Image: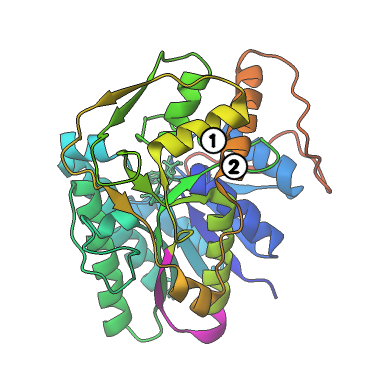
Amino acid sequence: MAARVLLTGGTGYIGSHTYVALVEAGYHVVLLDDFSNSSPDVLNQLEIITGVPTRFHRADVSDANAIRPIFAAYDFDAVVHCAARKSVPQSLARPKMFFDANIASLLALMRVMAGHGVKTMVYSSSATVYGQPESLPIPEHAPLSYTSPYGLSKIMGEQFLNQQVRTSAGWVVGTLRYFNPAGAHPSALIGEAPVHDGGNLMPLIAKVARGVVPALDIYGHDYGTPDGTGIRDYVHVCDLAQGHVQSLDRLLRHRRSHTLNLGRGSGYSVLEVVKAYEAASGCRIPYRLLPRRPGDVAASFADPTMAARVIGFCATRDLHDMCRSSWAWETARQSDLQGALISPPYRPLGLIAAAPSVIVTPIARPS
Ligand SMILES: NC(=O)c1ccc[n+]([C@@H]2O[C@H](COP(=O)([O-])OP(=O)(O)OC[C@H]3O[C@@H](n4cnc5c(N)ncnc54)[C@H](O)[C@@H]3O)[C@@H](O)[C@H]2O)c1
């Protein structure tokens, strides 16, 4: 029988793409989100893409009383935990709010999971746990450090989970350290659409391409990189989504935990991304070269060898795929926002429902 999975943060950027990959892999997935950084519209898009009615609950993961009835209603085999705050600038401005959001929610979730005998989790971590990397590419055994409360919250999350695996029989966790997710689903129906600006490069470039902001601010142009701008390991969000399926498959089959880098293993500079986006969009992207920002690193890219060996992860889509799909999503979204008719290039194979099938808002609490 197909495994049942709770996907937190399921209407967010990575969660929504992961949902599609999990459903396509045959998992029964229940979505949970509080819409603090996403829109309910995503649920309709997910039904169109997958042809499967969505099962969704609106709840804050840190509210154990709100999520307990969801665990009681379904017999989950595993949780994929993507829900978290991710904006580094916001974490610097309001660190306490960040710890409440990212740590309190993880602890509440673990408590409720334990209470219902659910002991399998795929956890969204981040390359930010490597802080200022000492050498490149970065292997999983590299020292951990942080340059923001966001980074610290991810390290702490990993440590709580490691502790749980060590001390509680039966627990297995797949910790996935994402490098820089970019791009969108080929349907152009879902993509990166944060309510709060997370500071990710591609949505910022897209804003310039659309003429919403006049120029891209590039922080640091005197790093020891070929063109002086920072280098990051951009990985297509659909490759990343597939990595979750591979991680979950492995956890459920082999009952052994893993901590893995999900990246391509090579990087692109900010200026290379700008050029690739210009080619994909046909738009000029003006930019301003500004001084470095404290905490930013010159270059960061993954050693993805272990992810390939342990779960068979291999990122196949390149920077051009990321830019093309991002631009397709941005233009489709714009026509949608302007009320124009969209004809997505992608057609669902199965059922198309006009609205998500189950929305419980919020789920009833036990008395
Ligand atoms: N996008 C990136 O660049 C990146 C890189 C590394 C790691 N990550 C991690 O991946 C995960 C997903 O990131 P994303 O890019 O999809 O972010 P996102 O903001 O698009 O998605 C997160 C979703 O979680 C929801 N959410 C947040 N707090 C919640 C709560 N307490 N209860 C219920 N729902 C809640 C938000 O509404 C949103 O839909 C996060 O844990 C993030 O830290 C992201």
Q: Percent from the top left, x then y, of residue 105?
A: 31, 53
Compared across the picture, whether 241 is left or right of 135 comes to: right
The structure residue drawn at horizontal position 21% and vertical position 65%, both measured from the top left corner, is 144
Asked which quadrant contains residue 243, the reply is: bottom right
Residue denoted by label 2: 320
Along the horizontal axis of the image, is 130 left or right of 263? left
Q: Residue at x 55, y 27 (%)?
A: 278
- Amino acid type shown at disc 1: Ala
When asked about the image quadrant of residue 286, the answer is top left
Residue range highlighted in magenta = 251-261
Check disc 1: other Cα within 10 Å, few if <14, some if 14-19, many if 20+: some
**Local SS, label 2:** helix
Give the mark nearest the N terminus, 1 or 2: 1
The three-letter code of the residue at mark 2 reads: His
Q: CA distance from mark 1 to mark 2?
A: 6 Å
Q: Foreground residue, 2 or 301?
A: 301
Whether label 1 touches label 2, CB < 8 Å: yes
Instruction: Judge whether 329 appears above or below 125 on screen.
Output: above
Residue to which mark 1 is pinned: 276
Q: Position of residue 73 (x, y in %)?
A: 55, 60
> Is residue 186 one of those drawn in magenta?
no
Image coordinates for residue 315, horizontal then vertical, percent: 56, 60
Viewer-nearest residue: 343 or 206: 206
- Answer above or below: position of 45 versus 175: above
- Along the viewing direction, whichever of 212 and 220 lies nearer the viewer: 220
Q: Quadrant of the rendered structure where residue 353 is?
A: top right
